[in-house]
Structures are given as structure tokens and as C-alpha cells.
Image: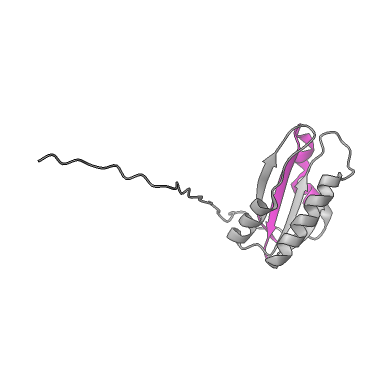
Amino acid sequence: MNRRRSAVVAPYRVQEITLCFRRSRRRTFKTNSSADVAKVFEDLSNEVRECFYAAYLNGENEVIGVERVSAGTISWTYACHAEVLRTALLVGARALIVVHNHPSGNPRPSQGDLDITEQLTKAAEFFRITLLLMLA
């Protein structure tokens, strides 16, 4: 008897995403002003590429996590609002602050900056997450 094994080929490949989030042993800090946030991200001014970060806050406006969402080129980076909100939902954030740098030194927000802020604000409202601040 010749037994022939047939290979089972799945028509779809499923990917699993694992988010590892640990609460810091350090005390969380409460954000009271944009100056507090600027202190946290002061090293961002040394970056030679545009980088986009999100800080996730609990209901008491304490920062519970910070994530680098993207790093781009010297003049542009892409920030997907879905990625920012996915992490916010997974960590139970009630508010968020998004920050990115301009390596050129020009602090004026571009039209793209204004567009992503508007899109992110609208998308976050759907999940009852508040966008507190957008720093560029």
C-alpha cells in the first residue's frame, strides 16, 4: 500500500502582532503644560531625520507610555493615525500627545502636519480618546 501524504496549503497566511507593554517602575508623571511635554522630548531636537512620537496618557493625564511611531527622511515622515490609535487602545490610554521634529529648524507646521492632526483628532474622538497636544 502506497500512502501518499498530501500537503495542506492554507490559502491565507495569518500574522500575529504582539505588543509588549510594561508599566515603568519609575513613577509616571503628570503633564500640566506643553513645557512638561517639551522636556520629555528635548532630545528630539538632535535628530537628523523627522521622527513622529506619541505619548499615551491615563485618565489623570499621567504619561503611561511613549512610542516612536515613525522615522522618516530629513524633511518628511509618515504617521499613520491607525497605528497611533491601535497602541492607544491596547494600553488603555484616555488621551494622547503627538510630537514630531523639523530637522530644518523651521517650527511652522506644514499642511501635512495640520492634516494629520485633524485626521487624528477625528479618529481619536470616535474612541473617546482626546488628542491633547500636537507639537512640531
Region of the chain picked out in magenta, as a range = 36-65
- The image position of residue 7, as x and y in percent, is 29, 42
Left or right, residue 37 beside residue 110: left
Image quadrant in which the N terminus is located: top left
Residue plotted at (77% across, 59% down): 121
> Can see residue 136?
no
Colouring convention used in this rendered image of the protein: one colour
Residue plotted at (80% across, 56% down): 118
- Which residue is farthest front? 1
Eyeballing the image, is 43 above or below 39?
above
In-front residue for pair 12/116: 12
> Can see residue 21?
yes
- The image position of residue 69, as x and y in percent, is 67, 45
- Which residue is farthest left? 1
Eyeballing the image, is 26 above or below 45?
below
Q: Any magenta on residue 7?
A: no
Residue plotted at (66% across, 50% down): 66
- The image position of residue 44, as x and y in percent, is 76, 40
- The image position of residue 62, as x and y in percent, is 70, 61
In-front residue for pair 63/125: 125
Residue plotted at (54% across, 51% down): 19
